[in-house]
Amino acid sequence: MVCNWTRILASKIDAQEFFLDVYDPFHSKTLGTDFWSTVFRSFFFFLQRSFGKIRKATMKHLQLVDGHWLDRADPLYPYLQAQVLPQLGVCESRPEIGIDILSPLQATYACHEQVSGCSVVLKFFGRRDGHRSTRQCREQLNLEFANLVSLRQLGFDQPPLEFVRPLNKNDRLDFLLVEEYAWGHDLDYYIARAAHDGQGDRLAEKLELLALFLYALHDRTRGEDRIAFANMGRYLLHLGEQHVETAIVGNGWLAALVEACGKWCNRPEMWAPHQVSVHGDVTPTNFIFPILDGVLAIDLERMHRADPAYDLGFLAAELRHHFALRVLHADRAEPFIAHFFRSYCRESREPEALFNELTMRNRFYMALAELRIARNTWLPLAHRRWLCEEAVKCLQ
């Protein structure tokens, strides 16, 4: 394969994305995670650092500069050097640590050690929202760390089905959680390729892997308690009221939502399922597909006990939302949604019965997800209104 270096540098392609585009379409099994992986990661990070766009973010005690090296005088530096990098086999006396911003809103950064090629993710719970108390930040940090540890102990600690490995946490550094870096494209990438480039087969393959992952998560955490569905109904109405308050929709729309929600709350089958642990935030960017196949999940801040249809309905809503937003054809998501549900149910002893049960309950949870997506203020106003209207249609 010929590498067009001029195109790489001119368009400022993300180093990781270029690296994956070279190998992922061919599902290469020859590239290991040792020597050559280290060489490629180090080299492409050098390109990214040299030609990438520079952004700056000041964080209380920490000075994190996107695309630059971490200052050795920064309190984060000795922490990473002494407590984090040794867990990855890096014992450099003066490691060169590069910084990239992954999400300014979520105060999430990537750190890359130049010599070894090892990378970690930093999540600062103390810098996300100035209205959070110290207690709330500590609780969120400890909860996500504990969730990751407990789920990896259930067998989700290695490919092909894996939750990201937590490496360390530190209350004193803005409530910092450190995780291993996930090398791979996220589901959003494959949705975009299916929508714009006709690569539907690749998306279907990744959705099948994700279905297997979620089925395993739900099956291994299933309990005896039934669903407290009234909480779901209250949450749906709360979201609806928020949209009326922000003038996305009117009172007539809210009246229709309240009426439809009441009918769903009176359906016995919505109260019947046993509770499982759901991921709780099945957005496409929270599922990474590594180079050597499998799926890796991140972000467990919203994990809780609920109906397994909660996760499935949210993914279905995300697929319709993305196809509607990207190519103005939400219905193009339907074959992928059906494939995802069939793949999930295939693991059951009675796949057809489970499929019918889940697709019925899916309508409620899909509506719930559409209302939650519609809260995102960066979306076009017309699209947010469409999501609200779609939610009521789902329920009726």
Image: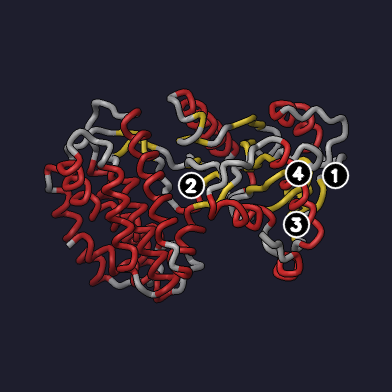
Instruction: Give the spatial CA distance, label 1 vs label 2.
Output: 31 Å
Residue drawn at (18%, 40%) of the image? 271
The answer, for residue 238, to whether it is visible in the render is no
Residue type, numbered disc 3: Gln
User: x, y (%) of residue 349?
Assistant: 20, 33
- Cα–Cα span, label 4 and label 3: 14 Å
Residue receiving disc 2: 287
Q: Which mark is residue 39?
A: 4
Cα–Cα span, label 4 and label 2: 25 Å
Check if mark 4's residue and mark 3's residue have beta carbons within 8 Å: no
Calculate the distance from the C-alpha at mark 2 to the C-alpha at mark 3.
Answer: 23 Å
Q: Is residue 177 above or below residue 238?
A: above
Of pointers 3 and 1, the one earlier in the residue sequence: 3
Q: Which residue is mark 1?
A: 71
Q: Nearer the viewer, mark 1 or mark 2?
A: 2
Q: Which tag, 2 or 3, sits closer to the chain's start? A: 3
CA–CA distance in space, label 3 to label 1: 18 Å
- Mark 3 — residue? 48
Mark 3 vs mark 1: give the one in front. 3
Label 4 environment density (alpha carbons within 10 Å; few <14, some 14–19, many ≥20): some
Circle 4: residue type: Val
- Label 2 crowd (10 A; few <14 / some 14-19 / many >=20): many
